[in-house]
Image (cartoon, coloured by chain):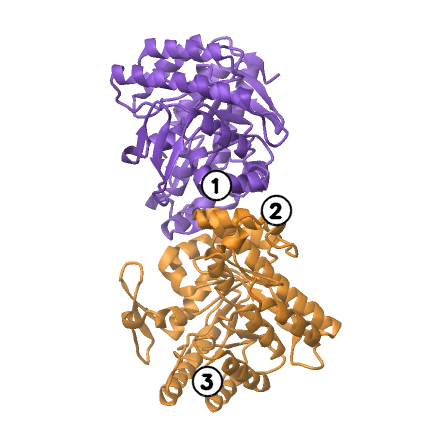
Chain colours: A purple, B orange
Amino acid sequence: MFFKIEKTDLKTSARCGTIFTEHGEIQTPIFMPVGTCGTVKGVHTNELKNEINAQIILGNTYHLYLRPGIFIINQAGGLHKFNGWDRPILTDSGGFQVFSLAKNRKLTEEGAVFKSHIDGSKHIFSPENVVEIQRNIGADIMMAFDECTPFPCEKKYAKNSLELTNKWLQRGWKKFNETMPLYGYKQFFFPIVQGSVYPDLRIEATKFVSDIGAEGNAIGGLSVGEQKETMYEILEIMNENLPKDKPRYLMGVGTPENLLEGIERGVDMFDCVMPTRNARNGMLFTENGTINIKNEKWKNDFSPIDENGTTFVDTFYSKAYLRHLVIANEILASQISSIHNLGFYLRLMEMARNHILDGNFSTWKKAILNNIMQRI
Amino acid sequence: MFFKIEKTDLKTSARCGTIFTEHGEIQTPIFMPVGTCGTVKGVHTNELKNEINAQIILGNTYHLYLRPGIFIINQAGGLHKFNGWDRPILTDSGGFQVFSLAKNRKLTEEGAVFKSHIDGSKHIFSPENVVEIQRNIGADIMMAFDECTPFPCEKKYAKNSLELTNKWLQRGWKKFNETMPLYGYKQFFFPIVQGSVYPDLRIEATKFVSDIGAEGNAIGGLSVGEQKETMYEILEIMNENLPKDKPRYLMGVGTPENLLEGIERGVDMFDCVMPTRNARNGMLFTENGTINIKNEKWKNDFSPIDENGTTFVDTFYSKAYLRHLVIANEILASQISSIHNLGFYLRLMEMARNHILDGNFSTWKKAILNNIMQRI
């Protein structure tokens, strides 16, 4: 068994469950910190486990493929061995990064030819070789190679793109089933639903993806510039059409608000660079709203960073001290803020889970959203 | 009692002892990690205490005065309260930083007028106000305001500079004795011996400094470009002429070799940015020699960073992984390398101390120096 639903909310589609992998269980809904290059920026592995309580992290196939390279990761015995993270890892397929290379990539039926952002060297990603690469990385969950449609996107483009994504999905799924894990533990493969903001395309894509019969499914192409209300509408369509008994992963999303709205619409898994990227710019998420720690008003506020926080940085360091570190451009600022923000994201998921279990998710969500969306 | 010598080596002038402050005891010989802006770059306070075993850290008056500013530190209740470091702190006087501003500072009998490297604003440091600033920072040990002579330095310049440094010392010492600690614990004041590379000036300076009768004394103006043999000769002169019953602090020095040679010549305290600055450039110090982790040869060396190391990074992360992080310009690279290097420096001091206690310092020093100076 890969996924077990423990409880579904009565008023909404929110549910909580457990995903089972050979690197451990994941309690959903879950947020996955992004470890682009095999490291969650500024955070030690022990902090990720013991302070943040991360249950699964994400690696980026594009970045890892270029650096350190698949040969090194293979020699290490996979990414878990290489970076010392012994809990589950999910890798994306590299598609999103490659397509954001703009002029430095060319799309064909075969795959995507692209130039490395590091040294300009030429590479190709295909539905087949990204499966092989992810076999080498050793992700517990790997993703299909897809085209993430831009926004805005004309319907004709979206339709053609979806056809390509679906063809690629078939090829990737075939490759996945023809190949074996390299390191002795089971790997899973998630297809991705595309279709831009067009309900009929999304429904078509969902059917195609559902027919594949993978252990879990992902929703791609959202949070790329559309209104959040549009995203929530698409999520409702996905919620109705995706298999209910399999985990749903909303890719690259988002704000704490997005996560709660996603959970309400039956999403189980999230990832986003926001908590760490914003941390490095001095933005903190808290239960009482977001803080721009660079603001003058914090300069002599010696209260803890977050009295409700459960990581050591939350109560050990003060707002005034963190502000000083940010202004002085000290590395420690990024470290503290990243631990805080990730700790908050994981705690938010844990709270959501507990309120689903307690049967009062909606009430809680409404109350906390009011606070979270403040700027303090 | 401020300083108690526990044992002096029979063959050399190496000694070990304990310095007593109200923020705790310091076992000498000791290395003090540099926390320029109130943070040891890339290292959390808990890691500094529990992994690195730092007993005292250094703060830079120049940097802290400009940012966050003395008003903020005072409001926090001193630097210990501000940054959460509850063990001893030593602050320099700002002299060294101000003089390195080159064209952006002007020296007068009164003090030094300088422009901030941050915003170009104009400030003055005098022997008196740097005492007041260090009272506000709340350093357990504060330093006299001096001119650190450049290298090379003509004797006439060195002589005039020394006269100024000595006059400033008298004024600073007077101010120190006329003022009180602000936060309820005792502060100590160390004068600094200058005199460039001229033995007669150094002896003259030592007499002047000794007559002040402070609780400890510092040796400045070394490791500024002179040959290391010259530094060791000056240290021998200092060793003969400085009071034996008071701790000697060799400022801004240096390599592991410099530290061991300093200990052999009766030095008790050291500080240097080298372990952290070099860490940020991918250079690791180990008992077997220095490692340039960027080197191609480490790319698939999955052995621990340092098998002899006692910090968690030493055995948790591999050389290949650290190399990858350095090449990918990841923050975590600086974090890991800084913890490793500081852990090594503190461990080197602890080993030296234990071998002085065991009566075999010379033999040990000779053996370990052979290894430390290798490049591997």
**Label number found at residue A69:** 1
- Where residue B198 appears, as percent x and y from the top left, is 46, 88
Pointers 2 and 3 in contact (CB under 8 A)?
Answer: no
Callout 2, which amino acid?
Phe
- At 40% across and 69% down in the image, what residue appears? B94
> Dot 2: what SS?
helix
Callout 1, which amino acid?
Gly
Chain at tag 1: A
Question: Does the rendering let one see residue A190?
Answer: no
- At 70% across and 68% down in the image, what residue appears? B354
- Depth check: B100 or B294 in front? B294
Residue hosting label 3: B197
Q: Name the outermost residue toward the right.
A: B358
- Where residue B178 appears, as percent x and y from the top left, is 46, 74
> Dot 1: what SS?
helix
Does A244 appear above or below B246? above
Chain at tag 2: B
Pointers 1 and 2 in contact (CB under 8 A)?
Answer: no
